[in-house]
Image (cartoon, helix red, strand yellow):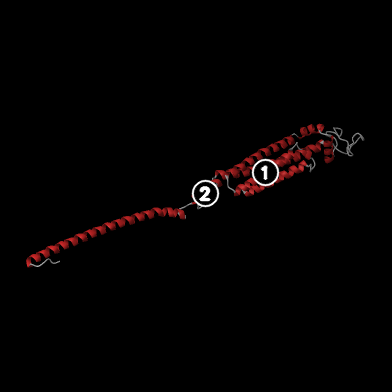
Amino acid sequence: MITTNLLFACLGVAFIALGLIGMKDGFSGATLFPDNTFKYLAILGAVICVAAIVGIIGAYIRKSVVTYLYMIIIIGALVFQVMIGILVYQKAANAAKYLSDIWPTASAGYRLNLQNQFYCCGYQTIMDNYVASDTCQPTSSLTSNLPPCAPALQGFVKSTFGKVYLAVFAALALELLAMSNAITLLCTGSHTDQDEEDERRKRRKSGIRLDDMTVDTPTTLVGQEEPKYFTYGAEDVNRNNRYDSYDMYRHNNNSNHYSDNYNGNTINNNRHGNGNGGGAYY
């Protein structure tokens, strides 16, 4: 997950760099790209970097809301990236028509810039909407050393535009990989909701996760021994009650035996007293 997001961040930085260079007209033919293409690329790169940051945070803070936010940002980047790729592809597939529509309506400065960058003069011919310069003066001489711009410009559009949209579409694979990782994380159930875990910890002072408790944990051992303790206590009470009943039985028997002995001695003494004329003897 972290490795994928690091690659994701590198892709975003690359898109930002390409967008900034294109907006500054940093290479020849940058002005031929459709309007706002480089601005869109810079925005796309920023969105991808944000998604990578959210993904890295989600790898450490396991919250479902972070994962869903990560997926939403990736989906937005995917849609935006596909739109940019289609825009560039359409211009590359119809390079001749695209350039023939641009050249006649473009400003003199725009055409002069292209003539200087591609070392050409005019469009279809050297007389076709040319801009006079030190190297492009077809009216001052019958011959010109510079060729028309159409072949060079069409070749650039087909080649460079093709590389750009291929790179944009190829980068979709990395975004799909990140999306599949997020979906797998949610579907496999390995994702733990930290909010729920925190709530459960608040309910338990020990901080032990309820689903991590086994029969070997101290808390469960205590819980298991409690019924035994009460059972043993009940047995002791019953045993003591039985002993108490036995003691009472012995006490009653002893009392009866003493009473019988006492009565027997009294009768005998009375008999001796009556026979011998003596008093009662105990």
- Is label 1 in a helix, a strand or a loop? helix
Q: Amino acid at mark 1?
A: Ile
Lower position in the chain sequence, tag 2 or tag 1? 1
In the depicted structure, whether residue 172 falls above or below residue 234: above
Residue 160 visible within the image: yes
Q: Position of residue 198 (x, y in %)?
A: 54, 48
In the depicted structure, whether residue 101 falls above or below residue 41: above
Q: CA distance from mark 2 to mark 1?
A: 37 Å
Q: Is residue 103 left or right of residue 83?
A: right
Q: Is residue 199 left or right of residue 249?
A: right
Residue under numbered circle 2: 202
Query: In the image, what residue occupies the spot 33% across and 55% down?
Result: 237
- Is label 2 in a helix, a strand or a loop? helix
Q: Is residue 182 left or right of residue 28?
A: left
**For mark 1, does the 10 Å Cα neighbourhood hold few (<14), some (14 to 19), or many (20 or more) residues?**
many
Query: In the image, what residue occupies the spot 22% across and 58% down?
Result: 252
Q: Which mark is residue 110?
A: none
Q: Nearer the viewer, residue 229 or 277?
A: 277
Q: Quadrant of the C terminus?
A: bottom left
Q: Nearer the viewer, residue 121 or 113?
A: 113
Q: Quadrant of residue 139?
A: top right
Q: Amino acid at mark 2?
A: Lys
Q: Quadrant of residue 270?
A: bottom left
Residue under numbered circle 1: 48
Q: Position of residue 279 (x, y in %)?
A: 11, 66
Q: Position of residue 251 (x, y in %)?
A: 24, 60
Residue 191 visible within the image: no
- Counting the numbered discs, the total is 2
Query: In the image, what residue occupies the spot 63% across and 46% down?
Result: 55
